[in-house]
Amino acid sequence: MASDAGRSRSRRASPARRQTSGHRQVGHTADVIVEAWGPDRETCLEEAVRGTVAAFADTRGSAPAAAVPFELEVRGDEDALVRLLEEVIYVVEVKRLLPVDIRVERDAGAGIRGVFHVIPLDRARIVGAAPKAVSWGGLRVAPEHSGLWRAHVTLDV
């Protein structure tokens, strides 16, 4: 069973960008599969984070209370997705914060940087089990022939 989360809820996205970006969860035994897409790699990564959070929390109507910056060195597109989602898991488990929005940019070097807009976890409406790890099995992040970027990732819950 697939659940379409719809178009990006980013406040900064243009109408054209929102039409070409989004995410959904795909049912999977004991795990969660998140599929995300966007017009560029960074938007696709943002949507993967939104899809990951939507798999276990309802953030609709949540106004960010703080910003948590991140800077990650990565070795390719798949590593960027794994490292970013591992950072989400860290922020949730250790800092007890829930990302309600995100901004990702390409770093000048070999990495990505950005900011999680967060709320305290105890203010969140939790609707499922939070992911504990990101699986490399079946992981994909790549542009299609159309230029649209797509990601597919399994989260261990």
Image (cartoon, rainbow, N blue to C red):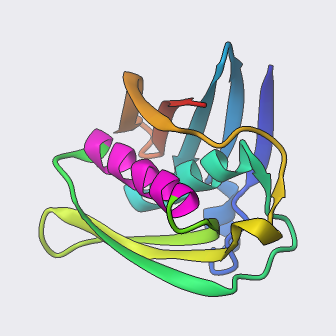
Q: How many tags in the picture?
A: 0
Q: Residue at x 78, y 82 (%)?
A: 63
Q: Position of residue 21 (x, y in %)?
A: 61, 54
* Residue 39 at least partly seen: no
Vertical position of residue 128 compared to residue 80: above or below: above
Residue 87, visible in the rendered structure? yes
Which quadrant of the view contains residue 47? bottom right
Left-right relation of 144 to 27: left
Q: Is residue 110 magenta?
A: no
Q: Quadrant of residue 40?
A: bottom left
Farthest bottom residue in view: 66
Front-lying residue, 43 or 57: 57
Q: Position of residue 90 (x, y in %)?
A: 46, 57
Q: Is residue 1 left or right of residue 150?
A: right
Residue that appears at 31% across and 50% down: 80
| Residue 101 occupies quadrant | bottom right
Question: Is-magenta flag for residue 88?
Answer: yes
Which residue is nearer to you in this view: 128 or 24?
128
Q: Is residue 30 above or below residue 125?
A: above
| Relative horizontal placement of residue 126, taking residue 28 as reference (left or right) | right
The stretch of residues the image draws in magenta is: 78-93
Residue appearing at x 65%, y 43% in the figure: 130
Q: Quadrant of the C terminus?
A: top right
Relative to 85, does residue 59 appear above or below in the rendering? below
Q: Choose between 54 and 103: the one closer to the eye.
A: 54
Secondary structure, magenta segment, majority class: helix
Q: Quadrant of the N terminus?
A: top right
